[in-house]
Image (cartoon, rainbow, N blue to C red):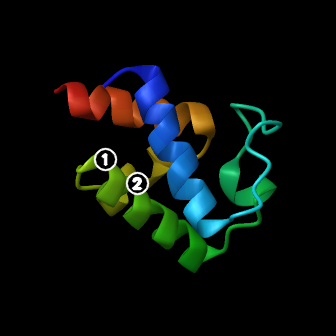
Amino acid sequence: MIDTEARAIVSAALLAIVPDAPLDTLDETTDLRDSLELDSLDFLAFVEQLSHRSGRRIDEDDYPHLRTLADCTRFLRDTTAA
């Protein structure tokens, strides 16, 4: 998976949870939970969306790799390449 594909999956997953998320203006290194005010249930729903859309199982141990847009993109790119 290339970065643009991974980023599209991340964006779609976020928009499914926060439909009005300002993804075009969100910095790649900004904490998603803080900037989008995701509570624990929102974050879990986001992880479920990522898993469903990418076809990859995402475990709780993977959550630290899903803090920012850049982290999420890198995570999907690197884990689906394996």
Q: Position of residue 74 (x, y in %)?
A: 44, 28
Going 77% across and 61% down the picture, which residue do you hit? 20
Residue closer to the observer: 6 or 47: 6
**Furthest residue toward left:** 82
Q: Is residue 46 left or right of residue 50?
A: right
Would you place residue 12 above or below residue 80 in this image? below
Residue closer to the observer: 13 or 37: 13
- Which residue bears the numbered disc 2? 50
Would you place residue 74 above or below residue 21 in this image? above
- Which residue bears the numbered disc 1? 54
Q: Amino acid at mark 2?
A: Leu
User: What element does badge 2 sit on?
Assistant: helix
Q: CA distance from mark 1 to mark 2?
A: 6 Å
Q: Is residue 61 left or right of residue 65?
A: left
Q: Position of residue 31 (x, y in %)?
A: 70, 46
Going 73% across and 43% down the picture, which residue do you hit? 23
Going 35% across and 62% down the picture, which residue do you hit? 60
Q: Is residue 13 left or right of residue 34?
A: left
Q: Quadrant of the N terminus?
A: top left
Q: Crowding at label 1, few (<14), some or many (≥20) Cα neighbours within 10 Å?
A: some
Q: Amino acid at mark 1?
A: Ser
Q: Quadrant of the C terminus?
A: top left
- Report if the CB atoms under discs 1 and 2 are less than 8 Å apart: yes
Q: Which mark is residue 16?
A: none
Would you place residue 35 above or below residue 8 in this image? below
Q: Position of residue 6 (x, y in %)?
A: 43, 33
**Furthest residue toward top:** 2
Q: Position of residue 54 (x, y in %)?
A: 31, 47
Q: Crowding at label 2, few (<14), some or many (≥20) Cα neighbours within 10 Å?
A: many
User: What element does badge 1 sit on?
Assistant: helix
Would you place residue 58 above or below residue 8 in this image? below
Going 55% across and 79% down the picture, which residue do you hit? 41
